[in-house]
Amino acid sequence: MPAEAAQAGYGTLAMLVVIMAISVWLGTQAQKAVERGGFIKGYFLGNRGLGAWALALTATVQSGGTFMGFPSLVYSYGWIVALWIAGYMVVPITGFAVLGKRFAQLSRRTGAITIPDLFDARYGNERLGLLASILIMAFMTFLMIAQFKAGALVMKLAWPGNTSLAMAEDVAVGGIDKPYYIGLAVFSLTVVGYTLIGGFLASVWTDLFQSVLMLVGVVILFLAVVPIASQAGMDRPTLDAMAATGPDYALGPGFSQQGQPPFLLLGAAISFFFVWPIGGMGSPASMVRVMACKDNNTLRRSIVLLSFYNLLIYIPLIVICICGRALLPNVAHADEIIPRLAIWSTQEWAGGSLIGGLILAAPFGAVMATVSTYLVVIASGVVRDIYQRFFRPRAGDAEIRRVSHVVMIAFGLIGVLSNIQPVGFLQTLIVFSTTATASSFVTPALMLAFWRRSTAAGSAAAMLAGAGTILTLFIVGSIAGGAAFQPYLLGGLEPIVWGLAVSAVAGITVSLMTSPPHEALVSQLFDAPAGKPLTAS
Amino acid sequence: MTRPPEDAVVQAARRESVLALGTWLVAMTYTITYCYLYGYGRPVDTLSFVLWFPDWVFWGIIAPWLVCTMISVVFAFGIMGNESLGDEIDVDLSAETSSEGGHAG
């Protein structure tokens, strides 16, 4: 069958149903684990019991984009995308070794369940905790809404008879119609349902499941595609892809169509070494998972596991997509390359439809896990940081459980309602929210963990300056470019670089200008407990 | 009043944090410098290949990625300490005050 005529078929739909069933089952298993401890710590932090596999494969930046957006970039622009993603080589170290140990320790020493809890306890300032909570909830809500649309689109492309295999917004797989709405409803019910049942652990376990699924998909695809493209030599895939595009496909700043801007100029290459390692470190969803790790040894093993996982995911994916350009040079929508390769390369295999379905199901699982993660973080913000802290400090487990469920259903409904007529620039909103979150929280997190002299005012200034810088650059970019919503690349650098820099200057300056924090409080969190020796235990 | 000694976990975490950020800085500097010098604006007929990769991709990205993976192993099991993270306390929000310095658990 020609690749252009490939359809997802019943195998894909069957795999999606299997994944949904497994996710709901994981939710029920997670609920049992939550019941073993106090509700709030179990539901929002998994009783601090995350092991190395769960932490390594779920606490860093991976989503549906890994299997859809990233391959589409490689297919379109060529080898330069390897430089775009190269920051992932240090993500395991920056993600776990910069803040991990200290956050895990501080959260135990203060009893913090959420990131705002930690800011509150570190500085003894509820208003700082509230500010952190508001920023996290605002940015996470944008991110969550965008993922609902992605989930609905994947369900739609799995619909038997559908000929499009892309989930990009501009393609919209035939528009917003009945299969889209059915997909939106099924996706929302499933993901809100299992998250509501199992809380944080349900989110982590489904995330772990999809990460393994993604690795299996990459290995199968590599074995199916690369030998075919490399039959006449390992350099053939690149040479064939260059013949279909141009010499820039193998060089920097990358191949681009006539009139299109270059993909990766020097400033952008530098910026993305900030986006992945530093931006990932500042994500509240990542920080809270580090707080939930079982012990120090878990952190160490997670660094190693994630290092090998990233190596086995990203480099093979790049080779697969270069081979894809050589084998299928004229795929209409670049987002389709992985689904097209999956169906094309497995069509002669026994059970090929199911294997192709398994590969296609990986991004669906990733989108579900991402929504689930955001739902838990948002719900913990509303329930723990606002409802319990300011309105009902004496609320019992039953009441907190009830309110948590109501909040999750409410935000699930927001996700659904926002996507009945989705806005057109959600991808830009994702970029905005991700960079704004990182710019707001990296400096305050480092100050919280390591700088005794930092103050609540300094941390608040760092958060607001980071968020404000990103917002300003997006507003200026939108006015200057005449587009709906786009960033201004000051000095050729992505906004995150400026956001981090301004946040750091503001945090340090304001801390030094304000009164030092109470020494007793600082000592409680930085110094050895009385009678405890300095040596490691 | 003399300050009590700083906690061993804080000291270890700070040292490891500096090393991790140093690794990031070195990896970024090497990778971007190498790729910019050998991968940008180069005549395509000078391109050679190592396995599936153009030479600049292999030596500028794949090789340092492998080195970083090895560094991660050494870092995790050879450099990073295995200190106890301490016991956890339970916080009663109803007993907390809202004043600066009022609580830390």
Image: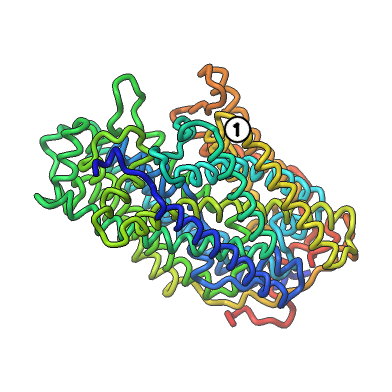
Element under disc 1? loop
Q: Position of residue A488 (x, y in %)?
A: 52, 26
Q: Residue at x 83, y 68 (%)?
A: A397
Look at the picture and state if A258 lies above or below A18.
above
**Residue A271, x across and y down, in percent:** 44, 39
Name the chain under label 1.
Answer: A
Task: Judge left or right: residue A389 versus residue A56.
Answer: right
Report whether A382 appears left or right of B98: left
Tell me, yes or no, if residue A498 can be seen here: no
Question: In the rendered image, which quarter contains the N terminus of chain A?
Answer: top left
Task: Specify the amino acid type for callout 1.
Answer: Pro
Residue A217 placed where, x, y %?
36, 58
Q: Is residue A329 above or below residue A345?
A: above
Is residue A438 something one can see in this rendering? Answer: yes
| Residue A460 image-quadrant placement | top right
- Residue A537's x, y, as percent? 59, 82
Q: Residue at x 54, y 59 (%)?
A: A20
Work out whether A311 lies above or below A437: below
The one of B45 and A109 positioned closer to us in this rendering: B45
Viewer-nearest residue: A283 or B28: A283
Q: Is residue A205 left or right of residue A34?
A: left
Q: Is the residue marked by circle 1 packed among few (<14), some (14-19), or many (20+) residues within 10 Å?
A: some
Name which quarter of the figure residue B63 lies in.
bottom left
Count of residue discs = 1
Mark 1 lies on residue? A422
